[in-house]
Amino acid sequence: MRPEERDENRLISNKSRNLPAEAQSRLVFSLISESKISISGLTPSTSSYIIGYICSKTKTMATLTKQDVWDLLQQVADPEIPVLTVIDLGIIRDVKIHDDGLTEVIITPTYSGCPAMNMIEVNIRSVLQENGIDPLKVTTVLSPAWTTSWMSEEGKRKLKEYGIAPPVEGTADKGALFGESPKPECPHCGSQHTELIAQFGSTACKAMYKCLDCKEPFDYFKCH
Ligand SMILES: [Zn+2]
């Protein structure tokens, strides 16, 4: 420690000697963060940085709410259909903040074999960790199975804008029982006159359709 620093530190201790412990801490804290005094053995700028770092960490731990996590999850896009977020898809089952500070995000994959699922977990981790959420755990729950009815109305609207017909509710059971294919609305012109071309579109989650009015082919996000 340089002699002048020692003098400053002595000055502080004289100033704060008669203060209650909390006021002393506050004084020392503000002087360190303003780089006026330093933590013993460190430079004033390093000391100030450490104080700032401790503050950012403790703030995250003390004030992080479930809503903050849900808000951040709005930034996590679906790897297959980037206009949809994991919230739109309805794959986030729950967010828990445990007493020990662990943040747990519980997800249910859209398809248990969906290769995109791994990517979704990676994307969730990267967005949350970039925002200082640590420690973090992503838990996959397979039951009850995800259904298209968990997709938000906002999600269905975005899907249609993207040119994919959103799932027609209630068609999953009917299709299985009577061998009928659902009649999704054409996302391009809104026509009801559409026909199934192929059970599997660009991915297993989608079927290929063709509009009989505007003649455009489109993907249909299958209901299940
Ligand atoms: Zn059409």
Image: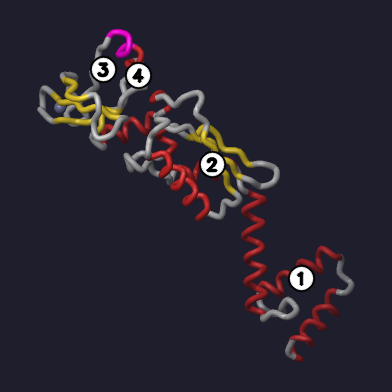
Q: Quadrant of the C terminus?
A: top left
Marked residue nearer the N-terminal end (2 or 1): 1
Q: Is residue 94 magenta?
A: no
Determine the residue located farthest toward the bottom in the rendered image: 3
Q: Could you give the CA–CA distance between mark 3 and mark 2, rounded to whole angstroms?
A: 35 Å
The residue under label 1 is 27
The image shows residue 80 at horizontal and vertical percentages of: 33, 40
Closer to us: mark 3 or mark 1? 3
Mark 3 crowd level (few <14, some 14–19, many ≥20, 10 Å Cα): many
Marked residue nearer the N-terminal end (3 or 4): 4
The reply to whether callout 3 and callout 4 are in contact (CB within 8 Å) is no
Marked residue nearer the N-terminal end (1 or 4): 1
Q: Is residue 86 above or below residue 36?
A: above
Marked residue nearer the N-terminal end (2 or 4): 2
**Does residue 190 appear to the left or right of 100 in the view shown?**
left
Marked residue nearer the N-terminal end (3 or 2): 2
The residue under label 4 is 169
Q: Could you give the CA–CA distance between mark 2 and mark 1, rounded to whole angstroms?
A: 41 Å
Q: Could you give the CA–CA distance between mark 3 and mark 4, rounded to whole angstroms?
A: 9 Å
Question: Could you tell me which secondary element the residue under label 1 belongs to?
Answer: helix
The image shows residue 47 at horizontal and vertical percentages of: 67, 74
Where residue 138 is drawn, which disc sits there? 2
